[in-house]
Structures are given as C-alpha cells and as structure tokens.
Amino acid sequence: MPSSSDWVSFLLRTLPGTGAEQIALWRATLTAQGMSPESWLQLKPRNRSKLFPLSESQEETLARRVPECLRFSAAMEDDAIWLMTPDDPGWPRGALEPLGPRAPEFLSGWGSRAVLGQPHVAVVGSRSATPEAVQFAEIAARSLVEMGLGVISGGARGIDQAAHRAALRTGGTTIFVLSEGVVSSTDHAHREELDPARVCLVSQVWPTQRFSTAEALARNHLIVALSQAVLVVAAESTGGSLRTGLAALEMRRPTFVIHHPEVTVHTAGNHRLRQAGAIALPAEAFRAG
C-alpha cells in the first residue's frame, strides 16, 4: 500500500517541471520541520510555497488535486495499487520513447508492476464484434501465451475483454491499458476476479479521473508503445481499434490484421489498415480446429 508520503510525492512529481531532486529536498525539509505530507498539503498556498516553492501554474494544478490526494492517503487500502514516475527504476523508458512529447508524465496502476516490463502483444478490435471475431481474439490470445508472450489491450467489451480473458485462462499475463484513472476504472472495481500476480491495470491519467474521449485517444498510443507487436482482429471504419492500428504503423511496430474476405461494417478498418501497410493474416488460421 502506498504511504501518504508516496502519494504526495507522486502528486508533486506529476506537476510540470518538478524533478527528483526537488522532491528529495521537500522530503528533507518536512522531516526537519517535523511535518507530515498531509499537514503540508493542508497549508495555505503561501505557506506551502515557503517549504516547497511552486510556480503559479503548478500551484493551480496542485490545488485541483489536493482534495483527491487527501482522500487517497485516508482511504487507500489496496496493497496492489502502485505509482510510477520517470524517476522510478521500473519506468518503461525504452518502450515510451517512441511517443515523444506524447509520453506520459506518470503512470498509476493495480496488480503486478513486473508484468508491465514483460513482452506483450496487443490484441485489439471492435466493441461490437461478431461472435466469430471474438473467437478469433480468444484463439490469438491463447496462441500468444503458448509462445511465452502476454496479451495487452484496452479492457473494452468485445475483442479486448475476450483477449484478456483468454490469456488468463491459458495461464498467461495480461495488461489492461485504461482510458480512465485506475481507481475509477470498472476493471479495478471488479479486481477481485483478477489475479494481481498476472494482471496489470495501468493508466496515464490521474487515478480518479473519469473516462474522456481525449484520454481514450491517448490510451491507444500507450497500448502500442507497451507492445512488441499489434494484432487488429476486427476494426470498423472509424474508432479506437482503427486508430490503434494506424498508431502502430506510425510508430513502426509490427502490425497485423486478420484478413476477412468480405468487407463488412465490422471489418472495414482491417482493409484500410492492410492498404496502409499492415500485414494480413488469413482468417482461416484463427478458426477453431
């Protein structure tokens, strides 16, 4: 379970322009003053800045997040919740480098941090996929686990959830990349059904933030960054699955699509990705034999 100091340090580290040296100085100052992190947060801004100078924009961000941080330190009882910033030795620096300025400033998560550093392949597709496409996703996920790889996806109903479930049932690991905060996530709400040793829920937004379209778009790029390759099972002509495939091509990740002979509303995105350079895999290879 993160200590109150961990939560407040995480809060400060998420402020633009705040580095590890400043955090270390802040900790030392509080220790010398005999003050807890929560007590410091509850000071008026002018008094807070005497102990840890903040710019106007940093103070504005801090003021928005202080109430939530206080709730975290008072109510957080889940020992599988974790926090990570670029100062952390486990930060996936190499994976996130292709994101450039889109790289997250922090990550929060639930479950195994070790899983985050293991090789995973993204299996993504439509929320309204056909039963056959769902079966394709399950077969793909099982095959990946049997090859020693994990499965990463976005946790959405349809293809994503089918891939996550199949990976776990086959004894593998899986990463849910969330478009909302890890505390707000419905996946986190049902965490009692998940094995924290083989599952990682990860988010690049503030832990209590609700779903937003903008963050869902950013999430697609994070899925690609954390993947060794991307398989698009069934993508419509618009939507997150298509955007994830396009992001994979843009970031030069190996990008595969299942080739469906007939172009339907559920597979139009696959054909577009194939035209853009994705490698087509025959649907027959994913049929249950």
Image: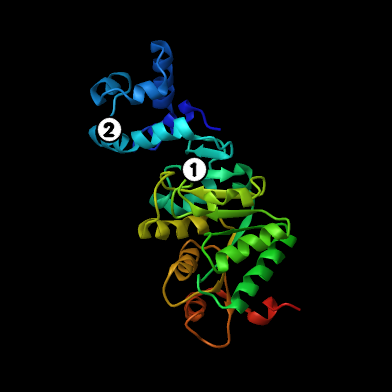
| In the rendered image, the vertical position of residue 135 relative to residue 65, given as above or below | below
Residue at 68% of width from left, 82% of height from top?
A: 284
Asked whether residue 286 appears in the rendered view, the answer is: yes
The image shows residue 163 at horizontal and vertical percentages of 62, 64
Q: Quadrant where the N terminus lies?
A: top right
| In the rendered image, the vertical position of residue 7 relative to residue 189, given as above or below | above
Q: Quadrant of residue 79?
A: top right
Q: Is residue 12 left or right of residue 107?
A: left
Q: Quadrant of residue 121?
A: bottom right
Labels 2 and 1: the sequence-earlier one: 2
Instruction: Name the residue carrying label 2.
Output: 59
> What is the crowding at mark 1: few (fewer than 14 residues within 10 Å), some, or many (at least 20)?
many
Whether the residues at callouts 2 and 1 have beta carbons within 8 Å, the answer is no
Residue at 73% of width from left, 60% of height from top?
A: 170
Q: CA distance from mark 2 to mark 1?
A: 22 Å
Amino acid at the residue labelled 2? Glu
Q: Is residue 190 left or right of residue 27?
A: right
> What is the crowding at mark 2: few (fewer than 14 residues within 10 Å), some, or many (at least 20)?
some
The image shows residue 199 at horizontal and vertical percentages of 62, 50
Identify the residue at the far bottom of this view. 262
Residue at 48% of width from left, 49% of height from top?
A: 203
The image shows residue 226 at horizontal and vertical percentages of 55, 54
Q: Quadrant of residue 134?
A: bottom right
Instruction: Name the residue carrying label 1.
Output: 108
Front in this rendered view, residue 131 or 250: 131
